[in-house]
Image (cartoon, rainbow, N blue to C red):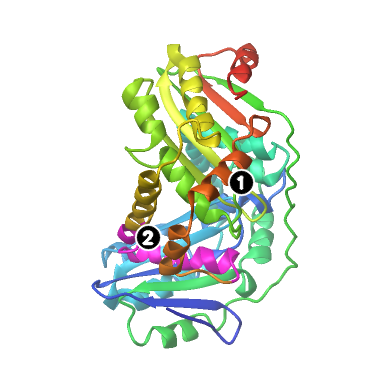
């Protein structure tokens, strides 16, 4: 892996991978919904859509997509709470085209007023789609509960409909100027990267804009929760969904590896405790899993499940029982579980990192949020050092009922929140 900066300061990471004829060109910007405010919530995601709507060189979406489809490229973009990414994945010989198009759409968009107005409707329908997915609703409300609806980390990434309908072209351009520049980005090439890639990058990004507007500092998060919280979202669903969340690790927290192993033992696989006990032995749900979402201030450790609407109490009790078993060593963690969890993480990482897209994402997120980004091999070494004592320490710290945030989505009344709250006191 080679990490350097262009003369204008843009960080560049190149990872030449063997055994592939594919290259992923990825550009990440450190901007997302946590950089927004109540009036412009949704603008990061809105802008992400608009970059594909035409440039000075390629005037329409059709021109952009035809050129990429013409070489069989995969291309897309995504917005998260703290970063936004744009990528093109191509056969190695088409790397110059991938770089050219990314630079073109990101730094030469025309932001046509008609396209902006047309895209408002597209995004409103995207919001409608997410709201029709109770799994997504549960996840969004869980983070809203733990961070608070008034903190940007608790915002929905797509924003509310009223914002999407009212954000002006002038606001879009100003927001672009504030966050899309050389000081707030990283360029990554991963795969069978051609020898002349560095020369092409230097030429393409030589005129990338420097900061045009002073970046606003994002609102820091300070955790103060002292009692459990329950949110009931009433929906006429055939299956009910829940999310149970606790404070988790940051990007740089020393215990990150222990959290990964703990989550794996609890709910990352079909042999995990939650899957075996709650699904296989009790038959309470179809899907159940645990996962971690890190941020710079505080992360989130979440368990999600979909279950029979009539058996919600048993489902909550089943999940809470497993948390208590592992926290209090009622069912002790075995060396076999520890070893299997470590090998599961290492194996899954190896599988993912065969793909240049995942490799690019690994290095890119590390460059944005971690001063000394670990290589995959170094990350696995940290995983292998985790002990059972580390897991108990992290479990006791994390699974505190006072810090629990439960979201239930289904055909329930808001007044049932009090009875659900009693079930998560463990």
For the record, the magenta segment spans 349-371
Looking at this view, is 356 or 311 the one in front?
311
Looking at this view, is 75 or 394 the one in front?
394
Judging by the rendered image, the residue that carries numbered circle 1 is: 42
Q: In the rendered image, which quarter contains the N terminus? A: bottom left
Please tell me whether mark 1 sits on a helix, a strand or a loop: loop
Q: Which labelled disc corresponds to residue 118?
A: none
Question: 422 above or below 5?
Answer: above
Judging by the rendered image, the residue that carries numbered circle 2 is: 75
Looking at this view, is 197 or 114 the one in front?
197
Say few, some or many: other residues with alpha carbon within 10 Å of mark 1 (under 14 / 14 to 19 / 20 or more).
many
Q: Answer yes or no: is residue 124 visible.
A: no
| 363 is within the stretch colored magenta | yes
Q: Position of residue 118 (x, y in %)?
A: 51, 46
| 216 is within the stretch colored magenta | no
Spatial CA distance of label 2 from label 1 is: 22 Å
Q: In the rendered image, which quarter contains the C terminus? A: top right
Q: Quadrant of residue 73?
A: bottom left
Q: Position of residue 111 (x, y in %)?
A: 56, 59
Question: 304 above or below 249?
Answer: above
Q: Position of residue 333 (x, y in %)?
A: 44, 40
**Residue at position x 61%, y 58% in the image:** 31
Magenta region, main secondary structure: helix
Q: Answer yes or no: is residue 228 visible.
A: yes
Q: Position of residue 412 (x, y in %)?
A: 54, 13
Please tell me whether mark 2 sits on a helix, a strand or a loop: strand
Say few, some or many: other residues with alpha carbon within 10 Å of mark 2 (under 14 / 14 to 19 / 20 or more).
some
Looking at this view, is 129 or 134 the one in front?
134
């Amino acid at each position: 892996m080679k990490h350097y900066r262009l003369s204008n300061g843009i960080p560049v990471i190149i990872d030449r991978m063997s055994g592939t004829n594919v290259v992923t060109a990825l550009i990440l910007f450190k901007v997302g919904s946590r950089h927004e405010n109540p009036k412009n919530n949704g603008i990061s995601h809105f802008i992400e859509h608009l970059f594909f709507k035409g440039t000075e060189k390629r005037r329409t979406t059709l021109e952009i997509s035809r050129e990429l489809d013409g070489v069989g490229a995969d291309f897309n973009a995504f917005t998260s709470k703290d970063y936004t990414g744009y990528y093109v994945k191509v056969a190695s010989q088409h790397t110059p085209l991938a770089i050219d198009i990314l630079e073109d759409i990101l730094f030469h968009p025309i932001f046509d007023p008609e396209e902006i107005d047309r895209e408002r409707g597209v995004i409103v329908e995207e919001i409608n789609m997410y709201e029709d997915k109770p799994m997504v609703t549960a996840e969004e409300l869980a983070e809203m509960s733990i961070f608070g609806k008034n903190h940007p980390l608790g915002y929905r990434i797509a924003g509310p409909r009223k914002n999407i309908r009212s954000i002006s072209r002038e606001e879009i351009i100003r927001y672009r100027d504030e966050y899309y520049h050389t000081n707030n980005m990283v360029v990554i090439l991963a795969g069978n990267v051609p020898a002349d890639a560095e020369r092409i990058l230097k030429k393409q990004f030589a005129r990338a804009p420097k900061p045009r507007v002073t970046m606003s500092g994002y609102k820091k998060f300070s955790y103060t929760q002292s009692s459990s919280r329950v949110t009931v979202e009433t929906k006429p669903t055939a299956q009910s969904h829940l999310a149970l969340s606790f404070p988790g690790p940051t990007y740089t927290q020393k215990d990150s590896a222990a959290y990964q192993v703990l989550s794996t033992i609890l709910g990352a696989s079909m042999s995990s405790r939650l899957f075996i006990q709650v699904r296989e032995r009790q038959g309470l749900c179809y899907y159940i899993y645990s996962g971690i979402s890190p941020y710079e201030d505080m992360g989130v450790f979440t368990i999600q499940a979909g279950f029979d609407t009539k058996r919600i109490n048993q489902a909550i009790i089943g999940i809470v029982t497993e948390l208590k078993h592992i926290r209090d060593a009622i069912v002790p963690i075995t060396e076999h579980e520890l070893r299997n969890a470590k090998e599961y993480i290492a194996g899954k990482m190896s599988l993912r990192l065969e793909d240049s897209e995942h490799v690019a994402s690994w290095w890119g997120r590390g460059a944005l949020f971690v001063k000394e980004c670990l290589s995959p091999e170094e990350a696995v070494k940290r995983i292998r050092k985790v002990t059972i004592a580390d897991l108990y320490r992290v479990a006791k710290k994390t699974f505190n009922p006072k810090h629990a945030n439960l979201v239930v989505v289904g055909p329930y009344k808001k007044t049932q929140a009090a009875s659900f709250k009693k079930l998560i006191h463990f």
